[in-house]
Image: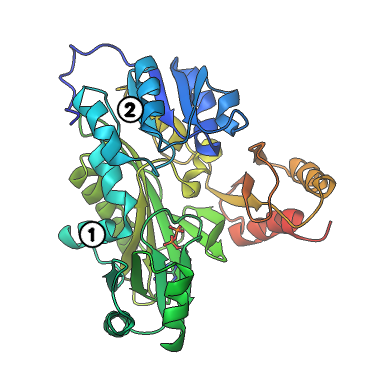
Amino acid sequence: MTHPPSDGNRRKIQRIGVIGGGQLAWMMGPAALRLGLELVVQTPSAEDPAVAIAQSAVLAPVADVAGTEALANQCDVITFENEFIDCEGLQALAQRGVMFRPKLEVLALVLDKRHQRELFDRLGLPNPRYAVLEGPESEAELYQRAEGVGLPLVMKTRRLGYDGYGTVVVKTAEDLVAAWDGFRRAPVLLEEFVPFTKELAIMVARSASGKVTLYPTVETVQVNHTCRRVIAPVAVSGAVADTMANLGRTLVNALDLVGIIGIECFLTEDGRVLVNEIAPRTHNSGHYSLDACATSQFEQQLRAVSDQPLGSSRLTCAQAVMVNLLGLEESEASHQQRIARLKQRPHATLYWYNKGLRPGRKLGHITQRLEAGDDPIAAAEELEALWYGPA
Ligand code: ADP
């Protein structure tokens, strides 16, 4: 167990261990420099983006407990850019006094979508109707649980799903078994298909002393279950914005979170907000904050876990759009041509993660700052045309 800080008598937190070395850790680099912090990452490959910006790296898979022990030996605190860790294996380190922020209990809770849903239910936070399967159930039980949820439904792998990998829409009862077979009958969540009008997300940071900072609620747009664009802030009623803020506060306080969390929700036609999922780290829906907020989500995470005061999360422009740049079925030269095109875009900043090209992989993103009255959808479509359109 980690304990709340007894302010004043703990040594200064200077070296931050980060489990994961992808783009989320990479984007912590400039903030770490500004805050006078050093980053050490645990990641499998020396080619992973964050190795280039870290003081040093432990080259080990994120779930490798011996790797995390080596990380802990070099750092004052350990935080996360990737939650797919071995929580049980790490308990011994926590018991030895290694400080994990957020604590391992939070990570354990989000690793299984079932536990996330049970948390939302316990806290009285509306979420889509669901049923769970553990794996050994019969087909008759599968049909029975699906009946309770209704069709169409969304079948989701409970562990290790991301970017829509592990999410399948099932339209008819005949497709249920094939879908479950597609998951090799692993533990899954069956969830009502929500005909949402918008998908919303919010980043919320919390310090060890319990101070909470909320970012604006944004709209996320997914293509094939993967985030394509983010519009900040979302145009919703004050009541919906208040609901997002309230559920953000409720969640971070209930989790006793130290760090930052991303919360994804569905907005229904009748104005209800249903929580879809949470991620106890920086999040794709918060990338816009690098260019459009007084304190980016990456700096905020580092501030929270190193006991530096949280910064302001206010927007520094009227609005902003962020577009994800996913790998295309095209040559490297074609990708380069598109990068060059995006670099010409005024009021926009391109982030290229330097990862190997693979169709569908998140390779970078671009954020454009907008003025009041600008049309964010038109701006996003123009950015998307520059990347996804004809060469
Ligand atoms: P992941 O963990 O892979 O990000 P999500 O649960 O966030 O998976 O699902 C990815 C996307 O699939 C969502 O952003 C949404 O567009 C769509 N989706 C997921 N669940 C539902 C649902 N119950 N109803 C309608 N669409 C859904």
Q: Nearer the viewer, residue 299 or 113?
A: 113
Where does residue 83 sit, x and y in percent of width and height?
39, 43
Q: Which residue is mark 2?
A: 305
Please identify the quarter of the rendering in which residue 85 is found.
top left
In what element is the residue under mark 2? helix
x%, y% of residue 282?
43, 41
Read off the residue under disc 1. Answer: 120
Mark count: 2
Instruction: Pick the quarter of the image with the C terminus.
Output: bottom right
The one of 107 and 238 positioned closer to us in this rendering: 107
Q: Is residue 11 above or below residue 338?
A: above
Camera sees residue 14:
no
Badge 1 amino acid: Phe
Q: Residue at x 48, y 70 (%)?
A: 182
Q: Residue at x 30, y 12 (%)?
A: 12
| Residue type, mark 2 in image | Val
